[in-house]
Image: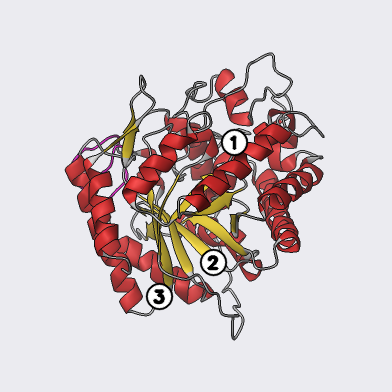
């Protein structure tokens, strides 16, 4: 899901020291896009919604089962760093039929969901064939319902056996066995899903996850102010993306490979960031990973939620909650025009077709949520009218769910779960979205 680009205050003091020593940070180098990219056919406009494995899937496996598993996020929560998710989430593993029923009511033609790596590989070198078959069944059921599946292979979580609480600098992307384990996992899933899935996302928002986990310290593995580890993890993540793209194409030559990136609209603040240190740092977060893998992807995925001043002051004095109509439950500034600016920037830099894989708002007001969607879709239309090649729009998210380090703290869903019946209750925003799609097959 979305990236919260706020560092803990302990990190901010360290950053301030660095800023004091640094006169500037160089801007990212210009991306050298090819003179002409091959045509990518995606058919009619993709109207969709997205979820993630960790945020939505219940455990669905007994603790004493040989297929029992944990993720690094589970362990990180046990260590007390983040709120626990709980074992039930939104029951999207054991009650996937309710998700499909809701998707059909929405009228979407695409649905993006994630594969839980830890579920598929609960132990080193051990694969849960039953779980693999169920993921294949989920893709097949979507196809039968007239909904094209978009499969995300990594959405922040690693199997717990790649995470070492005592050696965080050898965990996750920095674990010595991660590349081999990743290749085996991707090979298994790409082989199994090939008959039903054409569009794959190797990694969701690696750009933000790397900075938060290896520099900000409040996502796994929890490394604080370790630029060397961040650089190494970045290199591994890029290599893993490229490896996944090659494996997927070997299994299905007509596959569409998409990268997905959290790209806030960072606003310069010359008074609070006179050297542009923070602004350029955020530009590196936006572009560095994408620059190194764009040549192996067919579609650039954009996740947009907010605009923010790129300054230390804004990071330190983070707004909490819906202070007024221009903020979300997460304290994010609502700025539809910033969405237009981001789409223009991505188009100018890469010149590839764009899919908006996440756009949404955490709010207790359904009226505010509907207004957010309407205004952002209008800015997408404006960008398209100005030449940006947008091929799809996915609302975040299908169901109110766990919001990572924030816990159950924001209402992003087009539906909410009835805990007794396990059914999904359509929110007014979901009804609006369904009506809008029906009236606008093309934006």
Q: Tell me where the magenta segment starts and ends, as one range.
A: 320-334
- Ranked by sequence position, the earlier of labels 3 and 1 is 1
The label number, if any, that marks residue 425 in the structure image: none
| Residue indicated by mark 3 | 388
Q: CA distance from mark 3 to mark 2?
A: 13 Å
Decide: few, some or many residues near mark 3? Use Cα within 10 Å; few <14, some 14-19, many ≥20. many
Nearer to me, 390 or 433: 433
Would you say 372 lies left or right of 38 here?
left
Q: Measuring 59% from the left and 85% from the top, which residue is drawn there?
A: 36
Camera-nearest label, 2 or 1:
2
Decide: few, some or many residues near mark 1? Use Cα within 10 Å; few <14, some 14-19, many ≥20. many
**Image coords of residue 362 (percent x, y):** 31, 40
Would you say 285 lies left or right of 272 here?
right
- Whether tag 2 and tag 1 are in contact, CB under 8 A, the answer is no
- Ranked by sequence position, the earlier of labels 3 and 2 is 2
Nearer to me, 270 or 352: 352
Q: Measuring 57% from the left and 24% from the top, which residue is drawn there?
A: 60
Q: Is residue 58 above or below residue 430?
A: above
Q: Measuring 38% from the left and 37% from the top, which residue is drawn there?
A: 399
- Look at the numbered disc 3 and give the secondary structure of its residue: loop
Q: Is residue 130 above or below residue 187?
A: above
């Amino acid at each position: 899901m979305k990236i919260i680009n706020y560092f803990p205050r302990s990190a901010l003091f360290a950053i301030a020291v660095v800023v004091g020593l640094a006169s500037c940070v160089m801007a990212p180098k210009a991306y050298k896009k090819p003179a002409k990219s091959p045509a990518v056919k995606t058919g009619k406009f993709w109207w969709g919604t997205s979820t993630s494995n960790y945020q939505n899937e219940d455990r669905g496996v007994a603790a004493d089962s040989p297929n029992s598993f944990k993720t690094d996020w589970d362990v990180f929560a046990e260590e007390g760093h983040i709120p626990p998710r709980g074992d039930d989430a939104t029951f999207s593993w054991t009650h996937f039929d309710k998700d499909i029923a809701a998707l059909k009511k929405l009228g979407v033609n695409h649905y993006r969901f994630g594969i839980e790596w830890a579920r598929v590989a609960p132990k080193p070198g051990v694969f849960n064939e039953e779980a693999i078959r169920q993921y294949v069944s989920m893709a097949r059921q979507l196809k039968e319902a007239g909904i094209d599946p978009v499969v995300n292979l990594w959405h922040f979580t690693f199997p717990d056996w790649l995470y070492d609480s005592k050696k965080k600098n050898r965990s996750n992307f920095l674990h010595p066995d991660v590349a081999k384990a990743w290749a085996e996992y991707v090979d298994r899933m790409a082989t199994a899903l090939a008959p039903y899935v054409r569009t794959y996302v190797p990694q969701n928002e690696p750009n933000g996850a790397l900075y938060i986990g290896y520099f900000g310290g409040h996502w796994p593995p929890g490394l604080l102010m370790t630029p060397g580890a961040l650089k190494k993890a970045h290199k591994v993540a890029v290599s893993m993306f490229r490896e996944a793209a090659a494996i997927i194409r070997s299994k299905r030559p007509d596959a569409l490979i998409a990268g997905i990136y959290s790209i806030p609209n960072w606003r310069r603040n010359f008074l609070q960031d006179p050297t542009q240190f923070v602004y350029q740092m955020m530009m590196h977060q936006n572009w560095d990973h994408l620059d190194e893998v764009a040549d192996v992807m067919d579609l650039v995925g954009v996740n947009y939620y907010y605009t923010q001043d790129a300054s230390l002051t804004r990071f330190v004095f983070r707004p909490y909650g819906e202070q007024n109509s221009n903020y979300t439950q997460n304290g994010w500034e609502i700025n539809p025009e910033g969405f237009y600016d981001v789409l223009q920037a991505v188009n100018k830099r890469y010149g590839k077709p764009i899919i908006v894989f996440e756009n949404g708002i955490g709010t207790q007001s359904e009226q505010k949520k509907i207004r957010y969607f309407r205004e952002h879709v209008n800015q997408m239309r404006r960008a398209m009218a100005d030449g940006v090649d947008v091929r799809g729009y996915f609302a975040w998210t299908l169901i109110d769910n766990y919001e990572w380090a924030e816990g159950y703290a924001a209402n992003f869903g087009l539906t909410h779960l009835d805990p007794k019946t396990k059914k999904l209750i359509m929110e007014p925003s979901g009804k609006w979205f369904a009506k809008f799609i029906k009236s606008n097959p093309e934006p």
